[in-house]
Image (cartoon, rainbow, N blue to C red):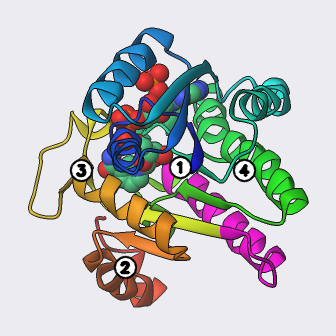
């Protein structure tokens, strides 16, 4: 039975991935900062897949001094860990964040520093174990800075580059490092945005993450058409790009 830990397990996308692992009778530890929400999700997963083992625990990404202790407790709870998904994040109001530097620091900490910190704790454990799959939800927003969301986007770019380095560090080992790059997904994070054709459901993306984790893929755009969209976006010359309203 695979043993999985999810950081930021109340995420709508992460929940869909957890459902897939639960279907495979996995042992899943859901970690998040809202224990009431986690208990509801855990009850739902148990009802959905009675043979899965679902556990919960407290994790606030911003309490970075606690990251190693939280991981140690997770390890004690599960005995060993085969895979981890880092899913937490927040989508800031770009204009408000540009003007409010403490908000900017807060958002950057959530979306970059805290992710890199807990990813490092997990990676060091997988190195010792010489096995494990670490998947982290970055974003297509990290592929190119745009005026409408470059604070969030550059934090995700930091995460993507960090994961690229980790993948290189583990390149000759069985440890898998997976960068997940969703496009726009219909979740509470984007509830305030008008939904267009490019929006995917949390289920599509969550199932894509499960597929990537079980197959040990490396850089995954979800849905897949974002790979082509971002290829085009990345290749627009800067002299033209800087004048676009994106
Ligand atoms: N939705 C999109 O369009 C989209 C696109 C690309 C990438 N992503 C990324 O996908 C991931 C999941 O987002 P989602 O779309 O599923 O949105 P979501 O349902 O709003 O999930 C965001 C999650 O982050 C958690 N979180 C935020 N700050 C935290 C903290 N300090 N400690 C612990 N947990 C914290 C939230 O916990 P609470 O429940 O306690 O608030 C929530 O579970 C994020 O990394 C996001 O950046 C989303």
Q: Disc 4 vs disc 1: Cβ atoms closer than 8 Å?
A: no
Crowd band around label 3 with a 10 angstrom C-alpha radius: few (<14), some (14–19), many (20+): many
Magenta stretch in the rendered image: 152-176
- Secondary structure of residue under mark 4: helix
Q: Residue 1, how many percent across, how many down?
A: 55, 49
Confirm whether the magenta stretch covers residue 172: yes
Marker disc for residue 236: none
Given residues 55 and 121, the one toward you in this image is 55
Given residues 82 and 139, the one toward you in this image is 82
Residue 72 lies, with reference to residue 152, above or below; the image says: above
Which comes sooner in the sequence, label 3 or label 2?
A: 3
Q: Disc 2 vs disc 1: Cβ atoms closer than 8 Å?
A: no
114 sits to left or right of 35: right
Marker disc for residue 151: 1
Q: Can residue 144 be seen from the camera position used here?
A: no
Q: Which quadrant of the figure shows ligand 1?
A: top left
Crowd band around label 4 with a 10 angstrom C-alpha radius: few (<14), some (14–19), many (20+): many
Residue that label 2 marks? 230
Q: For residue 39, which quarter of the picture? A: top left
Q: Nearer the viewer, mark 4 or mark 1?
A: 4
Q: Disc 3 vs disc 1: Cβ atoms closer than 8 Å?
A: no
Q: Nearer the viewer, mark 3 or mark 4?
A: 3
- Secondary structure of residue under mark 1: helix
Instruction: Name the main secondary structure of what is drawn in magenta.
Output: helix
Using the numbered discs, state the Cα–Cα distance from disc 2 to disc 1 in whole angstroms: 18 Å
Residue at (40%, 35%) from the top-left corner? 11
Give the tally of numbered discs. Answer: 4
Marker disc for residue 119: 4
Q: Residue 165, how many percent across, how many down?
A: 76, 73
Q: Nearer the viewer, mark 2 or mark 1?
A: 2
């Amino acid at each position: 039975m695979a043993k999985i830990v999810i950081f930021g397990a109340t995420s709508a996308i992460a929940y869909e991935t957890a459902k897939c692992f639960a279907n495979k009778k996995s042992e899943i530890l859901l970690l998040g900062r809202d224990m009431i929400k986690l208990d509801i999700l855990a009850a739902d997963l148990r009802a959905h897949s009675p043979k899965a083992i679902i556990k919960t625990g407290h994790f606030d990404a911003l309490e970075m001094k606690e990251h190693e202790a939280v991981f140690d407790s997770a390890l004690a709870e599960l005995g060993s860990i085969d895979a981890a998904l880092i899913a937490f994040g927040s989508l800031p109001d770009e204009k408000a964040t540009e003007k409010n530097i403490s908000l900017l620091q807060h958002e950057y900490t959530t979306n970059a520093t805290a992710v890199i910190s807990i990813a490092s704790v997990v990676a060091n454990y997988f190195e010792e174990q010489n096995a494990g799959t670490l998947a982290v939800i970055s974003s297509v927003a990290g592929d190119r800075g745009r005026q409408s969301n470059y604070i969030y986007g550059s934090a995700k770019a930091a995460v993507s580059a960090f994961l690229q380095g980790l993948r290189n560090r583990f390149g000759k080992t069985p440890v898998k490092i997976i960068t997940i790059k969703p496009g726009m997904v219909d979740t509470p994070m984007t509830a305030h945005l008008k939904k267009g054709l490019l929006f995917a459901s949390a289920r599509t993306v969550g199932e894509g993450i499960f597929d990537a984790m079980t197959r040990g893929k490396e850089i995954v755009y979800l849905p897949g058409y974002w790979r082509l969209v971002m290829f085009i976006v990345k290749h627009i010359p800067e002299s033209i790009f800087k004048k676009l309203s994106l």
